[in-house]
Image: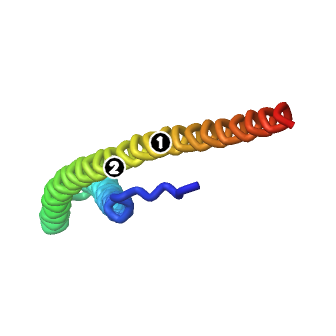
Amino acid sequence: MAKFLFRFERVLKVKQLKEQERQRELAQAARLAEATQRSLDALNRRIREQQSDWRSRVQGDVDAWRLQLSAAFLEHLRQERRETESQLADALQEVEARRSHLLDALKERKMFEALKEREHQSFRRAQARLEQRLTDEAAEIAAGRKRRAAGGASSA
């Protein structure tokens, strides 16, 4: 019996490798977005702590220099938060772009797998027809031999 060989097997392998690479790229982009989100969460905690510290300084003895320093540090944290929010937005956009690339690679692979399956089914049907034809021929040969043997026995 003949063995099925998919004519685009190498292309399918390349598509599978491309999909795996796209999965790794998506995972890397997602890790970066998560790390950026954690940084933003940490900055928000620091800002809340600094605001609380600033409020407590205002209630007690007021040292203008310390208040000014605390306000400047708070503004620095807020600026850092704005930059981190921008980085997070960029990272989330990258995650979506990578997800889209992965979906494209997935579609390409599935298209070749579907083609492989259709060709394999066609191959199996052709093999079944061939086997049936060979079986029919063997049955005809056997019947012919039987007739000749029966015909030869009746002539004797």
User: Residue 8's spot in the image, x, y percent?
Assistant: 33, 58
- Pointer 1 local density, CA inside 10 Å: few below 14, some 14–19, many at least 20: few
Q: How is the image coloured?
A: rainbow
Q: Position of residue 145 (x, y in %)?
A: 73, 41
Q: Can I make out residue 135 in this image?
A: yes
Q: Where does the image place residue 21, in percent across and percent down from the top left? A: 34, 64
Which sits in the foreground, 13 or 88?
Answer: 13
Q: Residue at x 31, y 61 (%)?
A: 11
Instruction: Residue type at mark 1: give it.
Output: Ala
Question: Is 49 left or right of 140, judged from the image as shown?
Answer: left
Which residue is painted at 56% across and 39% down in the image? 133
Q: Amino acid at mark 2?
A: Phe
| Camera-nearest residue between 86 and 70 | 86
In the rendered structure, find residue 112 and report the number of the disc placed on it: 2
Q: Whole-Å distance between the Cαs marked 2 and 1?
A: 21 Å
User: Considering the numbered disc 2 on the image, is that residue within a helix, a strand or a loop?
Assistant: helix
Is disc 2 in contact with disc 1, using a CB cutoff of under 8 Å? no
Residue 20 lies, with reference to residue 129, above or below; the image says below
The total number of labels drawn is: 2
- Which residue appears at 52% of the width and 45% of the height? 127
Which element carries disc 1, helix, strand or loop? Answer: helix
Left or right position of 153 against 15: right
Q: Is residue 70 above or below residue 128?
A: below
- Point out residue 2 in the picture as x, y percentages from the top left corner: 53, 56
Residue drawn at (53%, 58%) of the image: 3
Q: Quadrant of the C terminus?
A: top right
Between circles 2 and 1, the one closer to the viewer is 1
Mark 2 or mark 1: which comes first in sequence? 2
Name the foreground residue: 152 vs 86.
152
Label 2: few (<14), some (14–19) or many (≥20) C-alpha neighbours in 10 Å: some
Which residue is tagged 1? 126
